[in-house]
Image (spheres, grey):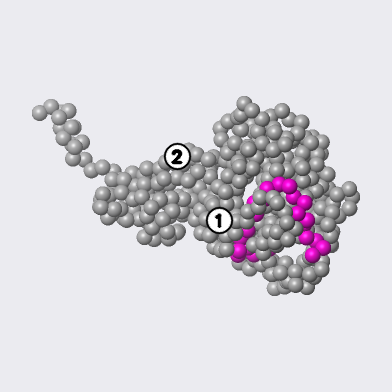
Amino acid sequence: MSFYFFIFLFSQFAIAKPRLEVSPTCALMDVPLSIEVHELDPFQHATIKAEIVDDVGEKWNSWASFEADETGIIYVNAQNPIEGAYEEADGMGLFWTMKPTLNPFASFKKKGDFEVELKLFVQGETVDIKNVQRLRQSFEMVKIEVKEGGLVGSLFLPFSQAPLPVIIVLGGSNGGLSENRARLIASNGFAVLALGYFGLEGLPDNLENIPLEYFERAFEWLSQRDDILGNRVGIYGISRGAELALLIGCLFPEKVQAIVAALPSYVVFGGLSIERVPAWQYRGEPLIPDAPVPRCDLSYGKGQNPEDPLTISTSYLQGMQEFPEDYAAAEIPVEKLQASLLLISGGDDQMWPSTLFASKIMDRLKAKQSQITRIHLDYPLAGHLIHVPYLPVETVYYHPHGKLWFSMGGFPCENDLASRDSWLKLLHFFQIQLCK
């Protein structure tokens, strides 16, 4: 017998090595994966571990163990783990359940694209490794820094031979730019302007007396660009940014065709200051009187550490009860909106009662006989952090301006499910409303 014949015989009887099969291995971060394990023995157990290192060197990981079927295959998307970081079948369970290994209260800090390492363990030994690329934006994307006319922002333009509808993304009370959301939305076929309004060079340091004329200039700037459809404008605002989005839509109704207000308020609240100052103004005056909020109890070090975070939704409820006339006067006149409206809220929101606030908006629209299209997506067990899906879920947050720890509320699995569902629906909403 020849040497090659022995090699052939050996290959026929060699034991196949268990392997991971992951698809796609490179995709936008809002694209779910299919994960399988092949070449196991029937009913054999195996463990998959996910790991990533963030921008500040914090290592995040999660794991889950599974039992193969009678053919030696594990279908992660369809099987419940037998143990691990999550309980029910979920192809992305290893991603949203990742936890920091050093600081249990670290925030996930990863600005750009990132790589997740998936390791397959059988009987305690590593038998396969797959690296998965998660992209913040599509490859054919242009970023334009905006620093003109007093505006500060970033414009993201996907490749297109025709002018595109545009979405303005407004962050919340942490200030700065919401570039990660903007990149991802732009990758779904929109021009997107991440627009700052405080907390950046050239803008106010704090959320106080923000001039709404600033956003009027943004509309004018967008309308002058040949690559943008200036008459197809949407706004996506989160938390205080949602409050702002509603105000802009009421003040400049003809400029906006669609608004997504995530975790919104139904009234105008004051600025982030020890003293009571307006958050917003127009022509040098407060547009609407702000609603008072009773001060939080900071005794015994409340909010000074993540183990004892502040829960401030009760303060807003207390304010509604104690100052009903002030809250009535501070209501945002949403009947002035001409834009279609999508509201997103969490029933366990511990920052403010966003479900109640969103319901108040819907009630006022009905009472005022508004004819606009309006949708309220409520997630009863989710909290204040409903955002881009498949990212590590946090339930406490250190506020960079308040310098305190806050409870966000919600159960991690419910926050992730709310993020998945609302993300798909807000993209569809903008497509329907802006791409007519």
Q: Residue at x 13, y 27 (%)?
A: 2
Query: Which circle marks residue 25 in the picture?
Result: 2
Q: Quadrant of the N terminus?
A: top left
Q: Residue at x 80, y 41 (%)?
A: 216
Q: Is residue 161 above or below residue 184?
A: above
Locate residue 8, reporting x and y percent. Answer: 18, 32
Task: Say whether residue 82 is visible.
Answer: yes
Judging by the rendered image, the residue that carries numbered circle 1 is 418
- Few, some or many C-alpha atoms within 10 Å of disc 2 (few <14, some 14-19, many ≥20)? some
Q: Amino acid at mark 2?
A: Thr
Q: Is residue 396 above or below residue 51?
A: below
Please name whichever residue, 275 or 268, is drawn nearer the observer in this view of the structure: 268
Q: Residue at x 33, y 44 (%)?
A: 19
Q: Amino acid at mark 1?
A: Ala
Q: Is residue 159 left or right of residue 216?
A: left
Locate residue 95, reporting x and y percent. Answer: 49, 51
Circle 2 — which element?
Answer: loop
Locate residue 197, reporting x and y percent. Answer: 76, 46
Residue stretch in magenta: 328-352
